[in-house]
Amino acid sequence: MIGKLGSTGHTQDPYDWDSRVEAWEMVAATDVFLSFRDRIIEAADACTADRVLDLGAGAGLVALEIAPHVARVVAFDISRGMLDRLEERAAERSVANVEVVEGDMRSLPFQDESFDVVVSNYVFHHLDDPAKELALSEVRRVLVPGGRLVLCDMMFSLSLQPRDRRLLLDKIRAVAARGPAGFIRIVRNAGRVAVGSWEHPSSPETWDRMLRERHFAEVHVGLLEQEAALALARRPAR
């Protein structure tokens, strides 16, 4: 049955995800995000005996799709509201092997070597690089030897590299096309970048380095549509 494993205690959510559940579900239902979900599940290559941890599970885009194919899924998120919606959707689908945990990815409340697979979709860019590194160290700790990490995230940097420049210009054009409200958003985002409070995407090269420095093996980072990329890695077998 659906269960709550508990919580890591009060967790501060700077993005107020509890108030954005409906908006996020609309994004998650788009063809692009459904494609990301399918890429993650295919790359995870999970089997019926696997225990899966979904980091930043949200309302269950990945967790509920992979659950029928594995032994157990733990859906982990900082937002109680997101997890409540996930439980509602699980009940509607009669999915009985998903458990929810509220907490912070930088300090996972699980024992060492608890999971065979860790997945994550569009979550890590909310963390700066030092926080990403903490979370990745936690991921490696909770994976079994030989366990797999599959994560999709926006991966680019604020640089003059051709791909980064093209992505940023495309985003600015798309927002500017909305008229005055779009220009206001551009100015606000520029201010957030200036003070370091904007999202924190990292380049594919940075992801490759961070994974290798956390002693993951078989690291591969591949570009997907738009600004996204898929990172694959394993905890080395003993």
Image: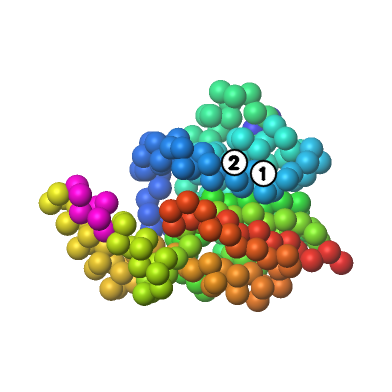
Q: How is the image coloured?
A: rainbow
CB under 8 Å between callouts 1 and 2? yes
Q: Which residue is mark 2?
A: 38
- Whole-number angstrom distance, CA of label 1 to CA of label 2: 6 Å
Q: In the rendered image, which residue does mark 1 sit on? A: 42
Image location (x, y in percent) of residue 92 = 56, 23
Which quadrant holds the C terminus? bottom right
Give the residue type at disc 1: Glu
The verdict on residue 230 being magenta is no
- In front of the other: 95 or 33: 33
Q: Please, which residue is most extreme toward the left here?
A: 180
Residue 176 in magenta?
yes
Looking at the image, is 161 positioned above or below residue 98?
A: below
Name the foreground residue: 83 vs 64: 64
Residue 137, position as x, y percentages in the image: 65, 68
- State which quadrant residue 191 falls in: bottom left
One can see residue 104 in this view: no
Quadrant (top left, top right, bottom left, bottom right) of the N terminus: top right
What range is drawn magenta here? 172-178
- Front residue of 8 and 83: 83
Which kind of residue does numbered mark 2 sit on? Answer: Asp
